[in-house]
């Protein structure tokens, strides 16, 4: 069972792969693509809800502006381009 520990703004997030779903298998090499997508959706959704909770319960907390969020996206795209150069990843 995979476990992930994140510490964000002094809050601890524990993620543990505990979901199950119909056994649809689509493998690329050793990667089960369907399982990877579901796991990533779970992790992202959990993180989004955790951050929403933190921001709602800490009104004095400085939140990123829309320009900063766009910069985060561009930095992430650049990182993905380095990791997966053959995919041709770019902004829409």
Image (cartoon, grey):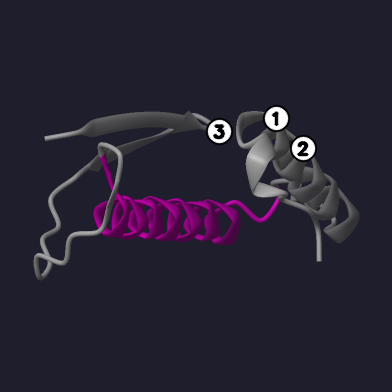
Spatial CA distance of label 2 from label 3 is 25 Å
User: Do the CB atoms of the residues marked 2 and 1 lie less than 8 Å apart?
Assistant: yes
Looking at marks 2 and 3 on the same chain, the residue that comes earlier in the sequence is marked by: 3
Spatial CA distance of label 2 from label 1 is 6 Å
Q: Which residue is mark 1?
A: 82
Q: Residues within 10 Å of mark 2 (few under 14, many from 20)?
A: some
Q: Which residue is mark 2?
A: 78
Nearer-the-camera pick, 75 or 78: 78
Viewer-nearest of discs 2 and 3: 2
Nearer-the-camera pick, 49 or 79: 79
Q: Position of residue 23 (x, y in %)?
A: 9, 65
Spatial CA distance of label 1 from label 3 is 28 Å
Q: Which residue is mark 3?
A: 9
Asked if residue 48 lies in the magenta stretch, the reply is yes
- Looking at the rendered structure, the secondary structure element under dot 1 is helix
At a point 38% along the width and 55% down the height, the residue shown is 46
Image quarter (top left, top right, bottom left or bottom right) of the N terminus: top left
- Looking at the rendered structure, the secondary structure element under dot 3 is loop
Q: Is the stretch drawn in magenta largely helix, strand or loop?
A: helix
User: What range of the chain is rendered magenta?
Assistant: 31-60
Image quarter (top left, top right, bottom left or bottom right) of the C terminus: bottom right
Viewer-nearest of discs 1 and 3: 1
């Amino acid at each position: 069972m995979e476990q992930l520990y994140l510490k964000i703004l002094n809050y601890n997030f524990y993620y543990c792969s505990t979901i199950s779903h119909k056994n649809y298998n689509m493998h690329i090499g050793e990667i089960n693509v369907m399982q990877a997508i579901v796991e990533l959706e779970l992790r992202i959704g959990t993180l989004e809800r955790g951050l929403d909770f933190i921001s709602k319960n800490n009104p004095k907390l400085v939140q990123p502006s829309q320009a900063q969020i766009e910069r985060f996206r561009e930095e992430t795209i650049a990182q993905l381009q380095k990791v997966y150069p053959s995919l041709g990843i770019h902004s829409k």
